[in-house]
Image (spheres, rainbow, N blue to C red):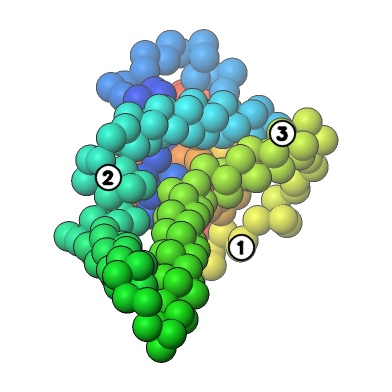
Amino acid sequence: FVVFRRTADHSSQLRPNFPFKFFLSPYHVINNQEMACSADGLPTSEALSLLHEDISIALDEYQKTEAEKNKGFGPKSVLYEAFHHKSSLSVFHWTSVIALIVEGIVLLVAFAACNDPRYQHLPAESFFIFLAVILNVYLVWWDTQLRHKEVPRLTHNVLKDLKEYHGNVLWSAENYPHLHSPLSPCITLQWTRRDGNTVNLPWSLLVRGDIILMKPGQKVPARCRPMQVSSIIFIYS
């Protein structure tokens, strides 16, 4: 097994289809004293605090980027996705809005031009057309807004839970999946040093400064650097 330490910066951005990803920076220089002191890995409370900090910074950057995209009628804006005829997410194009408004106006003009009692229902029809247009425009815009705000809203819930639990969380080695659990394409686990124990940690809980142990041929979960701690030998059967 090879021992690595994960390093990261805060230059990441959240993706709308993410679970969260952190794009890592060049290697952080770690001296021998720091290596020796950190060979037991991060405490769980400190790791959750770092995770909260990294997610908060990434979320702020994501929201700033989204605010820039939503200015005007750009391809990534809410108005474009909701009403543009080229948007694959739009269910009520602006052309349909214009056509229905024109239809309502034509009905009112026809009623005003004809005094025939048979056309007295035209104002009512025009009213319901305008009402349907307003209702549909609002619902489509509201649905698009929900889609744009879903990831930040869920992320805020995660941050709230992390802030609540990181100070008093007590995880033992038994709380993690077994070290020799079969590999799964759905849940990716990584041998990590936490609280002085080697645990099978989900990738999503890895933070900068974590010490991980790599198996031969295993995919590296993040940008890491090898550690050499002469006073500690890891032996696994």
The reply to whether discs 3 and 2 touch (Cβ–Cβ < 8 Å) is: no
In the rendered structure, the answer to whether residue 119 lies left or right of residue 25 reads right
Q: Earlier in the sequence, mark 3 or mark 1?
A: 3
Q: Amino acid at mark 3?
A: Lys
Q: Amino acid at mark 2?
A: Lys
Report x, y in % for residue 206. Answer: 50, 41
Residue drawn at (36%, 47%), measured in percent from left and top?
A: 78
Residue drawn at (56%, 34%), measured in percent from left and top?
A: 51
Circle 1 residue: 178
Circle 2 residue: 76
Residue drawn at (60%, 32%), measured in percent from left and top?
A: 52
In the rendered structure, the answer to whether residue 169 lies left or right of residue 61 reads right
Q: For residue 89, which numbered disc appears in the image?
A: none
Q: Amino acid at mark 1?
A: His
Report x, y in % for residue 169. Answer: 78, 40
Circle 3 residue: 163
Classed neighbour count for the residue bearing mark 1: other residues with Cα under 10 Å, few (<14), some (14–19), many (≥20) = few
